[in-house]
Image (tube, rainbow, N blue to C red):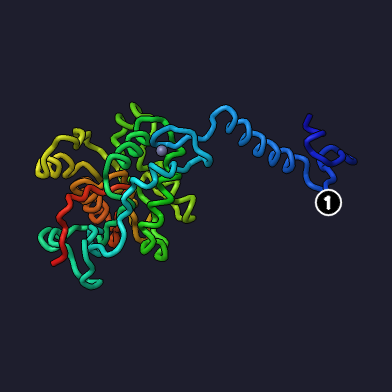
Amino acid sequence: VVVECLGGALVGNAAEIEQDGERVPLRQRLSAIARGMSRTVIDQLYPPICPACETASETPDALCAECFAQLRPITAPLCPLLGLPFAVSIGPDALSAEALADPPPFARARSAVRYNDIARTLVSRLKYGDRPELARLLARLMVQAGHEFWAARPVLVPVPLHVRRLIARRYNQSGELAQAIGRITGLSVDTGLLRRHRRTRQQVGLSHDGRVRNVSGAFSAHPQALERLAGRPVVLIDDVYTTGATLKAATRALKRGGADHIDVLSFARVVSGGEMPI
Ligand SMILES: [Zn+2]
């Protein structure tokens, strides 16, 4: 079967085949065929479906048109610090009231989309649904949202889970997003730069103050953080930015460890609606 598929004759020693007049190492050719075949086999066993509504779709790793239309991308004009969308543009330096009232420890926050029903579905599928390929789809949108970050060649650092939660869930959704962004941008991912050494309660259902108390002191930077960074900035990666308590606590831990420029990037952002520029 393999020989038929090769479309070329085996010549001389079996380590090379002749194809289109060119000698190609057999191993290289076979692995190319195996990759092509496995893609076809996978498509037959698991026809592409929309990762949100699970109806059949034409392309793998893409939302169907209806689900895509429900995403609310966060685009300019926005607060240059917190990344909150503004209803109207009043100049590139206008800050949100929230950024002025409570300046964040990180330099800039950006998110791909507003947190709504479709964003919630995608994030919970990523977290609990054992669909790590979903990370590729979300990462593509995040790479666009963080376009101002990439020229500085930052290190990507996912917000870590506590080790016991990681074992229970088998993978860290923020880690999956960071790895997928790393593959698109060619940037390196450091999953060991930040550690979650205290087990925190789930943030869901806690008040703003409760969230801050819950995560303060939960993170620490690697003792060799400075050496590992070698002067590069950091982009912290998380799935959802709610009050920012987790990302702020993680930023403070990295700063204590010596990092001096930290931006944060999340897939979805809770936007309460009334953000107006001042
Ligand atoms: Zn859909």
Locate residue 7: give its quadrant. top right
Q: Is residue 15 left or right of residue 74?
A: right
Residue found at x 38% / y 42%:
67
Instruction: Tell me if mark 1 has few (under 14), some (14-19) or many (20+) residues whose alpha carbon lies within 10 angstroms of its own.
Output: few
Image coordinates of residue 137 in percent, x first then y, are 44, 45
Image coordinates of residue 260 in percent, x first then y, are 28, 61
Residue found at x 43% / y 39%:
134
Q: Nearer the viewer, residue 260 or 263?
A: 263
* Residue most extreme to the front: 66
Quadrant occupied by the N terminus: top right
Image coordinates of residue 251 in percent, x first then y, are 24, 53
Residue 230 showing in the rendered view: no
Residue found at x 85% / y 45%:
18
Residue 21 showing in the rendered view: yes
* Residue most extreme to the right: 12
Quadrant occupied by the C terminus: bottom left
Q: Nearer the viewer, residue 80 or 150?
A: 80
Q: Is residue 61 left or right of residue 141?
A: right
Total labels drawn: 1
Residue found at x 69% / y 41%:
32
Asked if 188 appears above or below 46 in the picture, the reply is below
Locate residue 176: give its quadrant. top left
Residue that carries the numbered disc 1 in the rendered image: 22
Helix, strand, or loop for circle 1?
A: strand
Image coordinates of residue 205 in percent, x first then y, are 15, 35
- Cβ of mark 1 under 8 Å from ligand 1: the answer is no
Asked if 109 appears above or below 166 in the picture, the reply is below
Task: Identify which amino acid the numbered label 1 is placed on.
Answer: Glu
Locate residue 118: give its quadrant. top left
> In which quadrant of this rendering is ligand 1 seen?
top left
